[in-house]
Amino acid sequence: MKKLVELQAIAERHSTRSFDGRAIPKEMLEKIVDAGRLATTARNEQPWEFVVVTDPKRRQEVAAITEYGKFIAQAAACVAVFCRQTKYYLEDGCAATENILIAAAALGVQSCWVAGDKKTYTTDIAKLLQVPDGYNLVSLIALGYEASPVTRPPKRPLPDVLHWEKF
């Protein structure tokens, strides 16, 4: 059986917080964000909006506002995932975020998910990016090419987390 590219991207993706500064072509960024647009969504609401930040000054401003996303300043791009305030905005926004992470890995771009929902800085990020009222920040995604290979922490083995019929 042929291994699917998506499964390989899932297995190989990892969080990267050190980037080499190379730009990501606009067309590639559009493909990555398009994967977010295609995410599963409750009741087909598709509440998401994506703000791609490539301007170095603006990325520095975003990074300065966050608690644990200072590395966004060195990334090639940052995708801010916002969702309209719907019943399942968080689930939908997280599905879109995960699709973006996997698409980036499939295209050879590394990433790191920075939390957005329920953070104290969500309003400041929305104001900086001129997002209208009625939207929640779900995530910030740093994208770029890693400065040096990362040693990935091991994942728990499948037999330790998989249960059949009962826990």
Image (cartoon, rainbow, N blue to C red):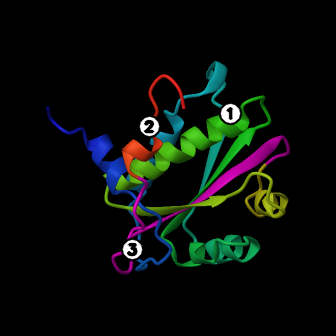
Label 2, secondary structure: give it. loop
Label 1, secondary structure: give it. loop
Q: How far from the left and from the top, in percent, is residue 30?
A: 45, 49
| Label 2 or label 1, whichever comes before in sequence order | 1
**Label 3 close to label 2 by CB (< 8 Å):** no
Amino acid type, callout 2: Leu
- On the image, numbered disc 2 is attached to which residue? 162
Q: How far from the left and from the top, in percent, is residue 127?
A: 81, 60
- Whether residue 38 sits left or right of residue 47 in the image: it is left
**Label 3 close to label 1 by CB (< 8 Å):** no
- Residue 33 seen in render: no
- Residue 115 seen in render: yes
The answer to whether residue 151 is magenta is: yes
- On the image, numbered disc 3 is attached to which residue? 146
| Label 3 or label 1, whichever comes before in sequence order | 1
Amino acid type, callout 1: Pro
Kindly report the distance in space between the C-alpha atoms of the residues bearing marks 3 and 2.
32 Å
